[in-house]
Image (spheres, rainbow, N blue to C red):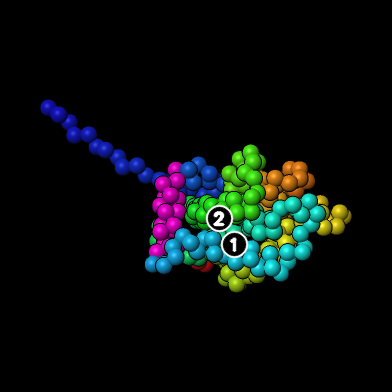
Amino acid sequence: MSEAVAVREPEDVITPRRGWFDLGLKELWRTRELAYFFMWRDVKVRYKQTVIGAGWAVISPIVLMVVFTLVFGKLRGSGATTVPTPVWYFSALLPWSYFSGSLQAASSSIVSAQQVVQKIYFPRLILPLESVFPGIVDFIMSFLVLAVLMTVYHVPFTSRLAIIPVVLIFTGLTAFAAGLWLSATNALYRDIREATPFLIQILLFTSPILLAPRKIPPSFRPYYALNPIAGVIEMSRWAVTGVGKFPTGFVLPGIASLVVMIFTGLIYFRRIEDLIIDVV
């Protein structure tokens, strides 16, 4: 005589945070499929019902490149004189466009998903994290445009370009780190939504896009290098132009700042996460 076997459905038990350093990374890994769903949804929504489609990903960097070339072309520093001006600027705009777009998306990720946040529980950390992935499509499209520019201006393709995936990873991590702080704060104070575009404009003109680092006063360079996106931009320019030495003086301080931003951002986000459901 066969006996009926009761099958228990898997369940998740929501428990309180255990200290400041309970970052919930295991919980985030268990819900990775949900993060993939959000990411794929953002990719489809971004280009839905558009005439140009993914072409919008490259319009902004191309327009900025043209403006910078015509207006600020003479501001290039020494060491870049053998590189055509459009390539010199676009090599910096390649990571910048990905960073600025991803930061804008990450900063508003929680507020944009408020309907979902209010109905079901899931690790809110998914939202700023998945926001940086759709921009990879934009990065790839921009890199194809850069490859065309390099071909037109006879800039050689060297083995240095192998570091471009590293540039992509560090750019995404920088956007995620800043997005942690902005998204959590934006859930509490909606002023962040209005301040984020202004912040991005400030970063645009304070990053080494217009000026070569050699034109930055030596006494100010150690502080300037603490900006993680500065190291990313210089690494991209070094890889594309094939000019100069690897920008260690910008990359290493930028990595140190990035690690601090991510670690403290995770702690801050997890502390604010408990309040999000009440204020979003």
The picture places residue 62, in percent across and down from the top left corner, at 59, 63
Q: Which residue is mark 2?
A: 145
* Residue found at x 77% / y 64%: 74
Q: Secondary structure at mark 2?
A: helix
Viewer-nearest residue: 89 or 95: 89
As shown in the figure, which amino acid type bears the numbered disc 1?
A: Pro
Q: Which mark is residue 152?
A: none
Nearer-the-camera pick, 248 or 10 = 248
Question: Is 6 located above or below residue 259 in the figure?
Answer: above
Q: Is residue 179 visible?
A: no
Closer to the camera in the image, 243 or 53? 243
Disc 1 vs disc 2: Cβ atoms closer than 8 Å? yes
Residue 255 rendering spot, x and y as whole percentages: 69, 46
**Tag count in the figure?**
2
Q: Earlier in the sequence, mark 1 or mark 2?
A: 1
Left or right of 154 on screen, residue 215: right
Magenta: predominant secondary structure element?
Answer: helix
User: In the rendered image, which quarter contains the N terminus?
Assistant: top left
Asked if residue 38 lies in the magenta stretch, the reply is yes
Q: What x and y, as percent, mark residue 245? A: 76, 43
The residue under label 1 is 61
Image-quadrant location for residue 92: bottom right
Residue 2 occupies quadrant: top left
Amino acid type for the residue under numbered disc 2: Val
Q: Which residue is rendered at x = 66% and y = 68% of the image?
A: 67
Residue range highlighted in magenta? 30-48
